[in-house]
Image (tube, rainbow, N blue to C red):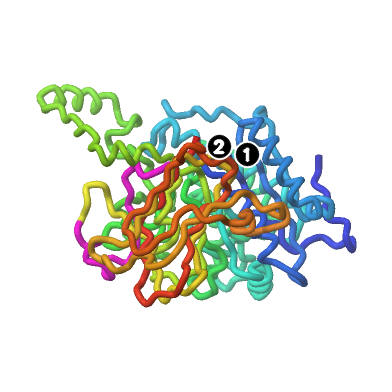
Amino acid sequence: SSPQTPAAGGQAPAVAVGMSAVKRKVDYVFDTVDRVFSSNPGASPSFVLVVHLADFDDAWATDAAARLQREHADEVATGKLHGIRAPRSLYPNLDVCPPLCPHAEGPEEGRWRSKRNIDYALLMAYSAPLAQYYLQIEDDLSFTLGWVATALNYAREQPELTKESNAPWRVIDFTGSGCSGKMMQSNELPRLAQLYLLFYDQLHCEAGLVRWMRSMTSGAPVEYFKTGEKLFKHEGLIDSNGGNHVTQVSCGGHSAPSCPECPSGKGEGFCHGDCTWVGDACIGMSPGSSISSAAQPVVQQKHQQSAAVSQPTQVAAPPTEEELRLRRFDNPPAWVISDMTVVPTFLANFAYVAGGEGQSRNDVCDSRLSPALRRPSVHGQRCWFWAKAVSQEQHIIVAFNAEITMEALEVSFGHDAHSKDVLVNGLVEVSESSQQSAMETGSAGKCGDFRTLKEVHGEREISWEPGASGPIAGIRCVRISMAESQTEWLIVRRILVKSL
């Protein structure tokens, strides 16, 4: 059925914010919805948020819809929050690769890309009649306070017709990355949605957007991101395709936070390294999408297979005892937050990795600040949480997505290259869920009253395992807190949790 606009005042919202969400190892959508509303308080411009629950898992979609209705009853009742879901029957065939693998990608990557285009098309088609402008975002972001007003004011400042093409502006780019943070005029959305439907199996969404702009007599977007205040911050560690989120890529001769940001308007010559130029857009190469991917010609595959006969077989080295020990810890999905003053680029999420430590990493932090980061590791670069000017009662919190039964905990402080940067006097604490958590918008608001699990007095490693009483059930948060201020900086290198 057609979407209904908010009834309050009888006036349509100025902006429709669209978000497509799928089931992930860590579901960020609920915290992101919280932040959308909490970051636009009071007299913010009228807007409506449309969440497309775009996963084919019926149970997940039903639970997600019920939770959004429960936690945002007022927004649903007033029409500020819409939740939609398209039946599987509306989607075309997504298993197009093989034989159609246009970007040297594997079957899973081709399926994910094709489905995402349909997800976006349905979201745009639904949102078009709701407001004057449409702004596409992702489901794992945080926001600058008042970001809707900033985006709306900037859009209203644009001339009706551009000097270059004597046509209206088609896209305002608030991020410089991917399809997120793009604003369009809603009356033009149906044609963009139709393009995604027509070429869903051919183009990445970024390339589709470029082609659409050119077809609409606009050579390039209005690039707010080059001069304006940053409105969005990516928070998710797990991307919607199931892979770990990459915070830095090689563009060939330089680096950037993502492949779409490599060219900076300079074209194909600045899109190399981890990225490739496809359909007028710089995109990341999927894992295994090199020449040896499933899409390569059969003749070449046979040549490689015959050549491989004479090559010695490489056998992976067996895991060490330390690697086996680390695999015990599963690190349940969680948000990591801190109120400490962070050494730039050494963020809290480096200390706790959802899924545990049994995986290679390629963290990005300022290697100039530590000699330990100038020596390459076979396991990739591993950064840590690093804080300075640490004061009494400051903390770092791991807030789990749901209560867990905790069977073991291990925290590592300091580093061989920075042996003094330990917790001189502090506590490791745990809590159950807050009784008021349904009313809280931040991850820390999910935590109840904390109780001490271990005291810390300068140790490099502390660990906890249950005694005769057994594992602790109902744990929602783990907190490392300062019992007193200290002059030395603080490194929390690793937090490991084993749950039942």
Residue at left offset 74%, top offset 61%: 47
- Where is residue 231 drawn, in percent x and y? 57, 67
Magenta segment main secondary structure:
loop
Which of disc 1 and disc 2 is earlier in sequence? Answer: 1
Residue 277's place in the image compared with 425, above or below, is above
Q: Is label 1 in a helix, a strand or a loop?
A: loop
Tell how many labels: 2
The label number, if any, that marks residue 115 in the structure image: 2
**Structural crowding at the residue carrying mark 2, measured as other residues with C-alpha within 10 Å and reported as few (<14), some (14–19) or many (≥20):** many
Residue 453's place in the image compared with 424, above or below, is above
The front one of 107 and 455 is 455
The residue where tag 1 is placed is 54
Q: Which quadrant would residue 359 be assigned to in this image?
A: top left
The answer to whether residue 235 shows anywhere in this view is: no
- Where is residue 432 drawn, in percent x and y? 61, 49
Q: Which quadrant is home to the N terminus?
A: top right
* Residue type (three-letter) at the residue carrying disc 2: Lys
- Where is residue 433 drawn, in percent x and y? 64, 50
The answer to whether residue 467 shows anywhere in this view is: yes
In the rendered structure, does residue 299 fall within the stretch colored magenta? no
Residue at left offset 60%, top offset 39%: 118
The label number, if any, that marks residue 459 in the structure image: none
The front one of 189 and 451 is 451
Relative to 70, 204 lies left or right? left
Q: Which quadrant would residue 7 be assigned to in this image?
A: bottom right
Residue at left offset 31%, top offset 31%: 296
**Residues tagged 2 and 1 counted as in contact (Cβ below 8 A):** yes
Relative to 423, 152 lies left or right? right
Q: Which residues are magenta?
A: 355-375
Q: Which quadrant would residue 161 be assigned to in this image?
A: bottom right
In the rendered structure, does residue 366 fall within the stretch colored magenta? yes
